[in-house]
Image: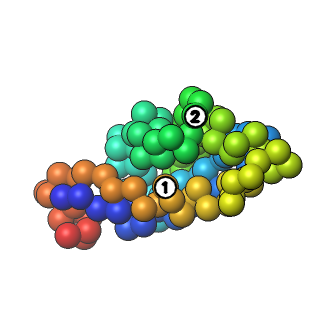
């Protein structure tokens, strides 16, 4: 089953220079292992495509049931240099929550996601 991350998590984002920061927080503790398994740095980079020119790093925060992603070279140089609409990275969290991930049907059913 393919589901949107909005069913599993909420998010916050911001920036520092040319790096966007996106935190993904599980809505329920039992969703966190799914996020860790399915939401990798590689998949996040693929989701954003050419918007993220540099590397994507992922940091696991198990005590918070969260993941933190750094999207390097994602802001066209940063807030004071960029002509991008969102040079501060505020909408990156919403964009990432629109990502769809695959969950086995049985797991989705057990979690009440079907």
The one nearer the camera, 73 or 94, is 73
**Vertical order, 53 against 35 (above or below):** above
Residue at the spot 49% in from the left edge and 55% down from the top edge: 96
Residue topped by disc 1: 96
Q: Could you say which disc has been placed on residue 53 in the image?
A: 2
Mark 1: few/some/many CA within 10 Å (<14, 14-19, 20+):
many
Quarter holding residue 24: bottom right
The residue positioned farthest toward the top in the image shown: 55
Residue at 33% of width from left, 56% of height from top?
100
- For the residue labelled by badge 1, is the local secondary structure a helix, a strand or a loop? helix
Nearer to the camera, 78 or 14: 78
Tag count = 2
Percent of width and height locating residue 77: 75, 40
User: Is residue 32 rendered to the left or right of residue 75?
Assistant: left
User: Decide: marks 1, 2 in contact (CB < 8 A)?
Assistant: no
Element at badge 2? loop
Q: Quadrant of the N terminus?
A: bottom left
What is the x, y in percent for residue 7? Answer: 38, 67
């Amino acid at each position: 089953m393919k589901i949107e991350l909005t069913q599993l998590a909420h998010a916050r984002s911001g920036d520092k220079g040319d790096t966007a920061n996106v935190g993904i927080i599980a809505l329920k503790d039992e969703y966190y292992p799914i996020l860790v398994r399915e939401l990798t740095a590689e998949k996040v980079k693929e989701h954003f495509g050419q918007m993220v020119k540099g590397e994507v790093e992922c940091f696991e925060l198990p005590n918070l049931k969260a993941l933190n992603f750094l999207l390097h070279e994602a802001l066209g140089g940063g807030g004071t240099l960029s002509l991008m609409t969102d040079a501060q990275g505020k909408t990156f969290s919403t964009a990432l929550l629109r990502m769809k991930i695959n969950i086995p049907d049985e797991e989705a059913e057990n979690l009440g996601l079907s």
